[in-house]
């Protein structure tokens, strides 16, 4: 992968098959932060914010199975399978407690991991996460589109149409749904997304794997049993949580985030005006400033266990 920026390395881990991730560097003694992208995303979703956080944190971003350059290879691409792979990644690569930063579906997976493995997660940064549904006005374009992509028959048809798009058009179509103003995404970061899209489109079963992820994600926040289990996982959290949410998010309405913040008053919530579903791409400076500020205040208790010098953690 070309032009990833100074200090950034494209790496692979062997976890029952190759797993691609980006190592953005950072101070040796800084807290380990593992970034988790959303549906149809990849590790480069964090490229705009990484240089702003790497002065404080040791930053890693993983490609979940079926996304970016990581193929499923029998490991599955549903949310439970992606959660299992994230857990193994934390054990194998940073090899100790981490702060998870999750966007969209990555926020859901981060919450599931924090609930299931509290010893592995010192804190959570949620950026426009997929949260349990509450009454909210759905977007008249985005909501039917997501439902269509998750449908067993229509979803694969739409995914095949997706493959016929050029990498540039594919990236533009996704960012147009996620951003209020796509021109705010740095040009170099946009070029990285196009490069990854070109590589992913050349790989087999990309569409089927993402479609399976969409169906699994939707079943968790709409299905009765799965939704209750997700709520229990969220309710069990004891680590500090920062919730950042764009007020003009079309995929996860701000009302959903506000309801979650009311239900969990220990969380820190920051609303980002004029921003959509991917603040780390559309408003990287403000997003990084909010995260760094939280790490120095309410999230400070997460930094010590996530740092290499903490007791019981390998340096």
Image (cartoon, rainbow, N blue to C red):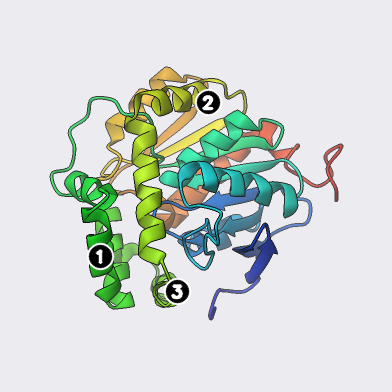
N-term-proximal mark, 3 vs 1: 1
Query: Residue 262: x, y in percent?
Result: 39, 20
**Mark 1 or mark 2, which is nearer to you?**
2
Above or below residue 121? Residue 49 is below
- Badge 3: few (under 14), some or many (20 or more) residues near its Cα, within 10 Å? some
Query: Residue 279: x, y in percent?
Result: 39, 51
Q: CA distance from mark 3 to mark 1?
A: 20 Å
Q: CA distance from mark 1 to mark 2?
A: 33 Å
| Left or right of residue 68, residue 175 in this image | left
Picture residue at 78% right of the left edge, 56% below the top: 28
Which numbered marker is on residue 173? 1
Which numbered marker is on residue 203? 3
| Left or right of residue 94, residue 251 in this image | left
Picture residue at 47% right of the left edge, 19% below the top: 265
Which numbered marker is on residue 233? 2
Q: Secondary structure at mark 1?
A: helix
Query: Residue 91: x, y in percent?
Result: 73, 47
């Amino acid at each position: 992968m070309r032009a990833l920026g100074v200090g950034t390395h494209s790496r692979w881990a062997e976890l029952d098959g190759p797993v691609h991730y980006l190592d953005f560097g950072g101070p040796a003694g800084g807290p380990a932060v593992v970034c988790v992208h959303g549906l149809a995303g990849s590790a480069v979703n964090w490229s705009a914010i990484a240089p702003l956080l790497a002065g404080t944190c040791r930053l890693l971003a993983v490609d979940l199975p079926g996304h970016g350059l990581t193929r499923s290879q029998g490991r599955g691409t549903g949310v439970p399978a992606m959660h299992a792979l994230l857990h193994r990644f934390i054990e194998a690569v940073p090899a100790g407690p981490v702060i998870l930063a999750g966007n969209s579906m990555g926020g859901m997976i981060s919450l599931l991991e924090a609930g299931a493995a509290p010893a592995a997660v010192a804190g959570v940064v949620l950026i426009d996460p997929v949260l349990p549904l509450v009454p909210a006005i759905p977007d008249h374009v985005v909501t039917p589109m997501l439902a269509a992509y998750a449908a067993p028959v229509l979803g694969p048809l739409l995914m095949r149409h997706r493959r016929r798009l050029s990498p540039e058009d594919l990236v533009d179509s996704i960012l147009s749904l996620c951003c209020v103003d796509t021109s705010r995404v740095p040009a170099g970061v946009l070029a990285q997304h196009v490069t990854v899209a070109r590589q992913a489109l050349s790989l087999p079963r990309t569409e089927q794997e993402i479609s399976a992820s969409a169906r699994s994600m939707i079943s968790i926040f709409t299905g009765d049993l799965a939704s209750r289990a997700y709520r229990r996982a969220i309710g069990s959290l004891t680590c500090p949580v920062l919730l950042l949410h764009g007020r003009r998010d079309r995929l996860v309405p701000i009302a959903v985030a506000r309801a979650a913040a009311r239900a969990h008053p220990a969380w820190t919530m920051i609303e980002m005006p004029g921003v959509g579903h991917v603040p780390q791409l559309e408003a990287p400076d403000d997003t990084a400033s909010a995260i760094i500020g939280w790490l120095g205040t309410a999230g400070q208790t997460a930094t010590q266990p996530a740092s290499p010098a903490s007791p019981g953690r390998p340096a």
